Amino acid sequence: MLARLSLLALCACLAAAPAYAKDKPAAFSCTGVFGPDSSEALLKQTYGAENVVTGMVDGAEGEQMLATTVFPKNPEKSMEFGWQNDDTRERLGFVYLPPSMSGPHGLRVGMSVDDVVAINGKPFTIGGFWWDYGGGAQIETGALANGDDDKSCFLSLAFVPNDDYPQDLDVSAVSGEVSIPTDEPLLKKLGVHLSQISISYAYPEGDVPAE
């Protein structure tokens, strides 16, 4: 659900229809299984019921939420879908794209900050790390910037540093609730890279349910 996502930072809508296969994720577009009218039933039809599992998953701040996971046993293909209607598991709220899928504008998990800046065409900022909502991209201008259409699919990007960064490095400038410019030298020293690509949709009339 949108209330449980990190900040939504950018928007993209693609017109091409996805090519479905039960053994791999569909090519990404804001239609079909990734469109606003997606459902658990469509996921089962597309990927096979044996590859679709619905249950409680971990959310932010230690909370649990209902989501439908496709290919749950394969980290490279696994996708997590959240619904605006949990009872019927219909109307897509959000989906986390798998590492194996190319997202809007050719975005891929694992890209460096410089890679994403090059795609956007302009610098942006990233939320500080090492807290529940850390690492979210905040893109206001450029090719990846948000649109104003509530019916669009919204793209949110999250970044993380490498686990094996030098432990004697002073990371206070990029820790916690701070806004980090993409030209901050620490980002390269920490090996910061794109870790998550998610798509979401606004609730009807912008109505987001409470936690």
Image (cartoon, grey):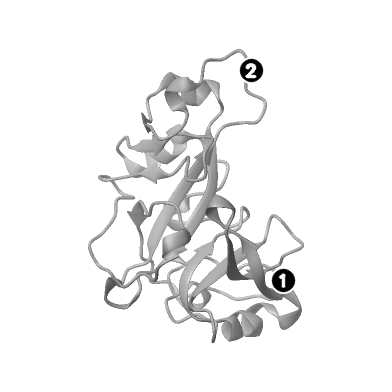
Q: Residue furthest top?
A: 168
The disc label shown at residue 23, or none: 1
> In the rendering, at what x and y percent does residue 128 appear?
44, 34
> In the rendering, at what x and y percent does residue 125 appear?
35, 36
Which of the two discs, 2 and 1, labels the residue nearer the N terminus? Answer: 1
Residue type at the position of mark 2: Gln
Location of the C terminus by quadrant is bottom left
Dot 2, crowdedness within 10 Å: few (<14), some or many (≥20)? few
> In the rendering, at what x and y percent does residue 107 appear?
48, 49
- Looking at the image, which residue is at 49% across and 72% down? 34
Name the foreground residue: 40 vs 122.
Answer: 40
- Looking at the image, which residue is at 60% across and 65% down? 80
CA separation in Å, label 2 and label 1: 41 Å
- Above or below residue 175? Residue 139 is below
As helix, strand or loop, the secondary structure at mark 2 comes to loop
Name the foreground residue: 21 vs 87.
Answer: 87
Judged left or right of residue 184, residue 50 is right
- Looking at the image, which residue is at 72% across and 65% down? 72
The disc label shown at residue 94, or none: none
Residue 114 lies in quadrant: top left
Residue type at the position of mark 1: Asp
- Looking at the image, which residue is at 46% across and 68% down? 29
Dot 1, crowdedness within 10 Å: few (<14), some or many (≥20)? few
- Above or below residue 30? Residue 42 is below
Q: Residue furthest left?
A: 148
> In the rendering, at what x and y percent does residue 165 appear?
62, 23
As helix, strand or loop, the secondary structure at mark 1 comes to loop
Contact check, label 2 and label 1, Cβ < 8 Å: no
- Above or below residue 209? Residue 197 is above
Residue that mark 2 sits on: 167
Instruction: State which mark lies toward you, 2 or 1.
Output: 2
Judged left or right of residue 5, residue 79 is right
